[in-house]
Amino acid sequence: MIKRFLPWLVLLLAIVVFMVLRMTRPELVQAEAQERAWLVAVQSAELIDATPLLPLYGQVVAPHQLTVTAALPGQIAQRPVSEGQAVAAGTLLVALDDADVAPALARAQADVADLQAQIEAEQLRHGNDQRALESEQSILASAQRQLERNQSLLKRNLTSREALDDVADAYARAELTVSTRQRALGQHPARLASLQARLANAQANLQGIKRDAGRARVIAPFDGVITDVQVAAGDRVSKNQALLSLYPRLGLELRARVPGVFVAELQQALNRGKKLQASTDDGRYRFTLQRFAGTGSAAGTEAILVADGSADGLRPGSLLPVTLQRPPQQQVVSVPFSALYGADTLYVVGEDFRLQRLRVERVGEARAGAARNLLVRGDELQPGLRIITTHLPNAMSGLKVDIAGVQSE
């Protein structure tokens, strides 16, 4: 009998236990949705006066580089310098063989001496012609008197026609001689002027040959560095052929293209006499902005910066990154690059720990210790504002944040 009701008793007992457990269970707490707060770092806004920096990338050039050319054709006798060698002023760079220089100089001197002799001969001839003209004029006057006498005698039948003809011939020859002499005297100024012009030309040629002969030995006019060596001792060269180049160690320039948006600002600073300097990141090389190129392009205008000092280690043609100091800016805020959103937006944390968007103007870059920061300016920027420096991909006005190290409400 008991076995028959046992399953029902177990079932009843289970129901009783279930009801007891249900009545004694704890009350469930209703879960409430909470808004997520993003953890960010901030910095306090501080209005400062700062010097913006402009990164530039330029090429080193030597504006005073000297190219040595052959003044005369000939053979290279000496070339005691080598590519890349530093030389002092007064050092022999290259010399032509004297055997190639002396003949040209001798020919030019001979031409001058020949023309000087021709001028002296012309002047002597002119003096002789003047003296001969006086004698010939006397002979002509005597022949004229003889002709007149014989004409008078012929009228009185005291001489013959043959005698008169002989006297007339003598008169004609004397007249021709005088005329020829006078023509020679009249041509003297033209002949003398021609010889003097030829002499002047020969003297100018002699001066040029002497100048070129003096340039057959090329001496360094300044302390510099040898480059572009194109000949060796024993080579034959033609006139005006390039031999080598020399550039001074001082006065190297860096030419870098500046974006057009900065050109007017920098030019105005130069016009006011401001000294704008640039340097490499390691501070090894320093340059001073001198001027801008006369022409520009869509990419900007080329700035010309002169190296301060000898700038040992720089070579023309080298590419060099530098940072140029722009004119100082007032009332700006320095922030890390991560704080800027887009080109003109910062976010600040309000009193309710929510983001607020600010419009700013990007002024430039500045050094912040070993790193670089952005300089910005804006009408809404006030001292003490908490600018977030953590770059949030979902940043927007009203977004709730937690500030690292500060407990939000």
Image (tube, rainbow, N blue to C red):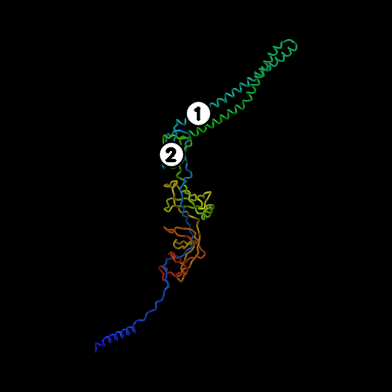
In the displayed orientation, state which residue is furthest to the bottom: 1
In the displayed orientation, state which residue is furthest to the right: 156
Residue with the mark numbered 2: 230
Q: Position of residue 267 (x, y in %)?
A: 53, 53
Q: Is residue 85 above or below residue 163?
A: below
Q: On the rendered structure, is 222 left or right of 182? A: left
Q: Earlier in the sequence, mark 1 or mark 2?
A: 1
Q: Position of residue 78 (x, y in %)?
A: 42, 35
Which image quarter: residue 193? top right
Q: Position of residue 45 (x, y in %)?
A: 47, 64
Give the spatial CA distance, label 1 vs label 2: 30 Å
Q: Which mark is residue 263?
A: none
Q: How many marks?
A: 2
Q: Is residue 345 above or below residue 88?
A: below
Q: Position of residue 271 (x, y in %)?
A: 54, 52
Q: Is residue 407 above or below residue 183?
A: below
Question: Closer to us: mark 1 or mark 2?
Answer: 2
Q: Residues within 10 Å of mark 1 (few under 14, many from 20)?
A: some
Q: On the rendered structure, is 265 left or right of 149? A: left
Residue with the mark numbered 1: 107
Which image quarter: residue 147? top right
Q: CB of mark 1 within 8 Å of CB of mark 2?
A: no
Disc 1, SS: helix
**In the rendered image, which quarter contains the C terminus?**
bottom left
Disc 2, SS: loop
Q: On the rendered structure, is 264 left or right of 370? A: right
Q: Amino acid at mark 2?
A: Gln
> Going 61% across and 27% down the picture, which residue do you hit?
190
Q: Amino acid at mark 1?
A: Arg
**In the rendered image, which quarter contains the N terminus?**
bottom left
